Image (cartoon, rainbow, N blue to C red):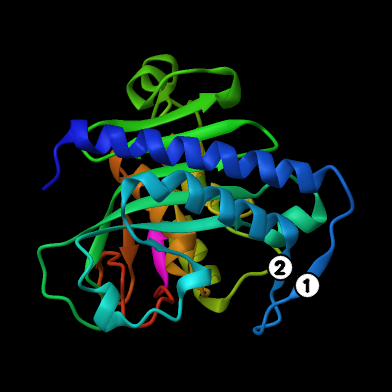
Amino acid sequence: MTNANDLGTAVDAAIRAALAAGREILAVYAGEVVVELKDDRSPLTEADRRAHAAIVAALAGTGLPVLSEEGRSIGPDERQRWQRYWLVDPLDGTKEFIKRNGEFTVNIALMERDALPAGPLGAAVPVAGVLYVPVKDVLYFAWQGGGAYRQEGATLAAGGAYERAAMAHRLPIHSHRATYTIVASRSHQSPETEAYIKAAEAEHGAVQLTSMGSALKICLVAEGAADAYPRYAPTMEWDTAAGHAIANEAGRQLIDVTTNAPMRYNKHELVNNWFIVH
């Protein structure tokens, strides 16, 4: 496995890439947002494209392949041979971006070939993650063996991952919550989510529901603001990988409910199975 110093250098590059993407996103956010529809009818904006270009340019010096929605046509025979690669969502929460509620993120994860045989269920795990919230200028970052952190005023700070970690809050942040808290939408609950909430109520008594857009839901659990995030709806690998790395280093888990094991990535199909973060 990779040593922590090596990963810290990779996180430096990912932070620079995320902040560059954030600048592009905010430049578009300040004006009129023009929305196009992708083939699957999901929204796409100029901010997605500009953020993607900024990230690819910033990560070019690492020499590693970048996998994102733009590269989803790369076949598993090719990408499962990669020992390391970047898994990127340049704008996670496009719908939140269009609504202008600020709950959107830049997600960048460093992925590494795992020790299990490659196959339809995956070939890689996240070993570092950077998640940036442009509107709030909040940066979450983590690397394997190095811890997970939340930094406010990210663009006002200088230095690499180690310097930022020294100035940031280490996750989880101690919370005085008395009520078991689940990240779930009140308005878009599936039967499986309702069943999960009922089971939690049976175990913990009162349960509080909280809602949040994009991969910030994973960060709420990682930082200790929530206890669990059940996701019984489709997501893509680039939606979760950065948050997964942060959750891991905060002592949390992202469990694939199909395998009842930590989520693997670089699957034949890049759609995630349902999962629970806790």
Q: Residue 10: percent from the left, percent from the top?
A: 31, 39
Q: Is residue 30 above or below residue 82?
A: above
Front-most of 256 and 2?
Answer: 2
Question: In the rendering, which numbered label is found on residue 36?
Answer: 1
Q: Nearer the viewer, residue 2 or 184?
A: 2
- Going 49% across and 66% down the picture, which residue do you hit? 231
- Relative to 174, say whether 119 is above or below: below
- Res 206 visible: no
Q: Amino acid at mark 2?
A: Leu
Q: Residues within 10 Å of mark 1 (few under 14, many from 20)?
A: few
| Magenta-tinted stretch | 274-278
Residue drawn at point x = 36 percent, y = 27 percent: 161
Q: Is 200 on the left or on the right of 126, as rendered?
A: right
Secondary structure beneath label 1: strand
Residue 188 position, x and y percent, is: 67, 69
Q: Quadrant of residue 7?
A: top left
- The residue indicated by pointer 2 is 44
Residues under labels 1 and 2: Cα distance?
5 Å
Which residue is painted at 50% across and 25% down in the image? 151
Question: On the rendered structure, is 144 left or right of 211?
Answer: left
Label 1 close to label 2 by CB (< 8 Å)? yes
